[in-house]
Image (cartoon, grey):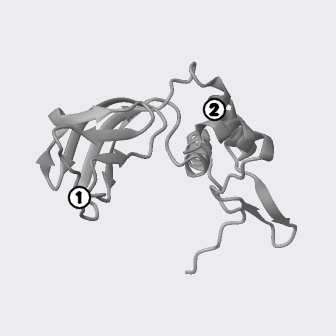
């Protein structure tokens, strides 16, 4: 017995899917997470320099830092705008992927309501529970939903510009 193909392709049904997709679009445009505040570990290519630019526009705390597997947290000075510097003439690794940084960064929703608004609006535009219908046919009946490719509008990009790296 052969299986019958579904009449309607199931599109993304979860509002969380669209929220994550909108957050991803904001992150791609800005070059970093932006909002809300999260803790994450970032692996970076080494610079061989004293200073290191971390992809973040607002570092609240660095909780771990290694360079070539060596713990350097006690030597790290932190700029809130994404720069880390090693004290005592220390140099960051020069190896690809040689640096690992665990940090708490971003803005709380109430500190950046404009960013939260862009994320919420883009997620809602993504279609919420059903996704955006991008094509529809009558016979044999089928519907195609958009994927997680959320397009930010020019006004939204302008709102995000101050947060862009």
Position of residue 15 relative to residue 11, above or below, is above
Mark number for residue 115?
Answer: 2
Q: Residue at x 24, y 64 (%)?
A: 95
Q: Residue at x 68, y 52 (%)?
A: 150
> In the structure shown, which secondary structural element does the residue marked by tag 2 occupy?
helix
Whichever of labels 1 and 2 marks the residue nearer the N terminus, that label is 1
Mark number for residue 153?
Answer: none
Where in the figure is residue 92, as x and y percent of width and height? Answer: 23, 51
Where in the figure is residue 101, as x and y percent of width and height? Answer: 28, 44
Residue 122 sits in quarter: top right
Question: Relative to 149, is 100 on the left or the right?
Answer: left
- Give the farthest residue toward the top: 110
- Give the farthest residue toward the left: 70
Question: Relative to 135, is 162 on the left or the right?
Answer: left
Residue 8 sits in quarter: bottom right
Question: Relative to 65, is 121 on the left or the right?
Answer: right
> In the structure shown, which secondary structural element does the residue marked by tag 1 occupy?
loop
Question: Relative to 112, is 117 on the left or the right?
Answer: right
Front-lying residue, 61 or 131? 61
Residue 123 sits in quarter: top right
Which is more foreground, mark 1 or mark 2? Answer: 1
Real-space Cα separation, disc 1 to disc 2, in angstroms: 32 Å
Front-lying residue, 78 or 66? 78
Mark number for residue 98?
Answer: 1
């Amino acid at each position: 017995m052969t299986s019958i193909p579904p009449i309607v392709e199931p599109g993304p049904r979860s509002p969380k899917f669209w929220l994550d997709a909108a957050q991803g679009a904001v992150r791609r445009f800005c070059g970093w997470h932006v909002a809300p505040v999260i803790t994450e570990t970032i692996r970076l290519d080494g610079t061989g320099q004293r200073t290191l630019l971390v992809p973040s526009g607002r570092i609240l705390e660095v909780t771990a830092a290694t360079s070539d597997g060596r713990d350097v947290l006690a030597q790290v000075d932190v700029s809130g705008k994404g720069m880390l510097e090693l004290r005592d003439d220390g140099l960051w690794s020069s190896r690809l992927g040689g640096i690992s940084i665990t940090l708490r960064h971003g803005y709380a929703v109430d500190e950046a309501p404009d960013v939260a608004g862009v994320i919420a609006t883009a997620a809602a535009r993504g279609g919420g529970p059903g996704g955006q219908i991008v094509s529809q046919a009558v016979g044999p009946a089928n519907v195609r939903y958009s994927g997680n490719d959320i397009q930010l509008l020019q006004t939204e990009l302008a709102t995000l510009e101050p947060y862009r790296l």
